[in-house]
Amino acid sequence: MASDPSTTVVPPKQGKYLEGRGKRILILDDQPDSVRFLTDTLKYQGFSVITSDDASKALDLVDQDAFDCILCEVELAHRKGFDVLSHAMTSNPSVPVIMISGQGTIYIAVEATKRGAFDFLEKPLNANRLLVTIRNALAQRQLMREKVEVSDDTLRRYGLIGNSPVMKNLFRQIEKVAATRSSVIIWGETGTGKELVARCLHKLGGRREGPFVAVNCAAIPKDLIESHLFGHRKGAFTGATVNYAGKFVEADGGTLFLDEIAELPLYAQAKLLRAVEQGDVEPVGGSPTRVDVRLLVATQKQLRKSIEQGEFREDLYHRLHVIELAISPLRERQEDAVLLANHFFKHFVDVCGRSDLTRISPQALRVLMSQPWPGNVRELEHIIERAVIFSEGPEIIAADIHGALEDPLAEPFSLQNDILRSDMTFEDAKELFEKNYLACVLKQHNGSVVAAAKALRIDRTSLWRKKKRHNL
Ligand SMILES: Nc1ncnc2c1ncn2[C@@H]1O[C@H](COP(=O)(O)OP(=O)(O)OP(=O)(O)O)[C@@H](O)[C@H]1O
Ligand SMILES: [Mg+2]
C-alpha cells in the first residue's frame, strides 16, 4: 500500500498512553490541507492513519475490514463521498463513517445522517470536536462488536437487564437490601423498571413464598383508596355490600408494593403510617387486625418536594425512607439500550412470529443509542415491538426505527421528573429542557431542520448548531 502514490500510510507516533493506540483510521479526502490536518491531529493521538484520495480505491479499502473508523470527504472525487458511504454501510456496517465537508449545508448533513453516517463535521475542522466525535464513534463500535448477547445471568437472577455501571451498582444494592425487612423507596422516572425492582426484592428475600401484591395509588379513586388498602366491613358505607379484606391483609406474610406513593391522599397516609408503625391495619367500619407485611414503595416524584408542598407527611416519609434505591433514566445508560433492544427484539420476534428477522442492524442500534427516551425502557420496548411488526426484513434497519419513533401516539416528553431531581442545577435544567424540546419539535417535523427552525422561529444555522451541541 505504501508504494501506491494515491495511498499513504502514516505510522503512529510512539507513546504509552495515547488514546489512539491500536486503532486504525481511514481518511478519504483529496484536499491536501485537510488531509495534513487530519493526519497530524490523529497521529499525535497515536492513531494509525491510512489516507487515500482515490474514490475507486477507497471502495477496496473500505471492504478490507481493517479500520476502526472512516473519515470521508463528501466532495471526494466530485461528490463520490456518498457512494463510498453507501458502500461502507452495506459492506461493513459496524465501522462508523464520519462525513466531512467544506460545504456545511443542511442538505449534505441530513443526507449524510440518512445514509447512515455516524456524524457530519464541517470544515474548517476543529481538532477537539474531531477527537470527541471519533472517540464517540469508537465507543459505539466497541459496544456493537462485543457480543451484545442479552445478559442471561442478570435476567435470571434479577428479572432485569443491564450491564452499565449504574445497573451493576443497583444489583449490588438489591443483593444487600433484599434479605432485610426494611421499607424501601424505589425512585425512578416512568418506565425505568421500578416494579421490576420491587418484584426482584421480593423474589430474592425471605418472603418469596408469600404473596407479592402491587397497588398503583394513582390508579385508584381517592375516596376508594382507604378501603382498597385497608379493607372494609359490610355496610360501612353505601356500596359496601360484603366484607373486603384489603390489600394489606392480602399481602400478609409477603410484600406490599405501593406504586406512585406520592399520589396517596393525606388521610390515607395517616392510616398507612399507623400500619407501618404498629403493624396493624384498620378496615373501614371495623377493628384493627395485625399484619406482617414488608412495604416497598415507588415514586417518580421527589418526596421532599411533596413534603414542602404539604402533600406528603414528613413522619411517614421518615418511616419509609429506610433505604432508597434510585434507577437511572435510560438516556444516562445508553449501553443498556443495546442490550434491552436485543432482548425485546428476540421476545417480539417470537411473539409476533417474525422468524424471518435476523437482527437489529448496527445503524439501527446507533439510532436507538442516540434517543432521549423520555418514556425510558417501556418506550424502547414499544419502539422495538412496532419495528418488529412493520419491518420488511430481513433485518431491522435504521428507517424501521425512525418509522417506529415517529408514531403519533408516542408519549410526549415529560421534564417534570428531571427538573424535580434535587441535584439538578438551573443551568442543567435549561439545557435538558432545550434538548428535549428540540428533539420533540424535530421529531414533529420528521427531522427537517428547515421546517423545525421555521416552527421555532429561529434561524437554521442556529438550530443546526444547537442540534450538534445536543448530539440530536
Ligand atoms: N432493566 C430492565 N430489563 C428488562 N425489562 C425492563 C427493565 N426495566 C424496565 N423493563 C420493562 O419496561 C417496562 C416498564 O417497567 P416497570 O413497569 O417496572 O417500570 P415503572 O418504573 O414501574 O414504570 P411506571 O413509572 O410507569 O410505573 C416493563 O415492561 C418492564 O418489563
Ligand atoms: Mg410502575
Image (cartoon, helix red, strand yellow):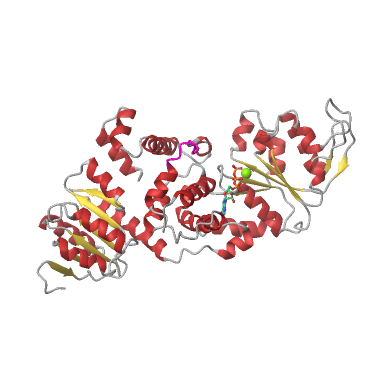
The correct choice, above or below, for 164 with respect to 216 in the image is below
Q: Which sits in the foreground, 29 or 174?
A: 29
Q: Main secondary structure of the magenta part?
A: loop
Residue beneath the point at 65% across and 30% down = 311
The correct choice, above or below, for 250 with respect to 40 in the image is above
How many numbered discs? 0
Residue beneath the point at 26% across and 67% down = 63
Q: Position of residue 188 (x, y in %)?
A: 57, 44
The residue stretch that appears in magenta: 406-412
Q: Position of residue 418 (x, y in %)?
A: 50, 39
Q: Which sits in the foreground, 121 or 363?
A: 363
- 411 is within the stretch colored magenta: yes
Q: Horizontally, is 365 left or right of 82 in the view?
A: right
Q: Is residue 397 visible?
A: yes
- 403 is within the stretch colored magenta: no
Q: Position of residue 156 (x, y in %)?
A: 62, 63
In the rendered view of the protein, which quadrant contains the C terminus? top left
The correct choice, above or below, for 44 with respect to 386 in the image is below
Q: Position of residue 446 (x, y in %)?
A: 36, 38
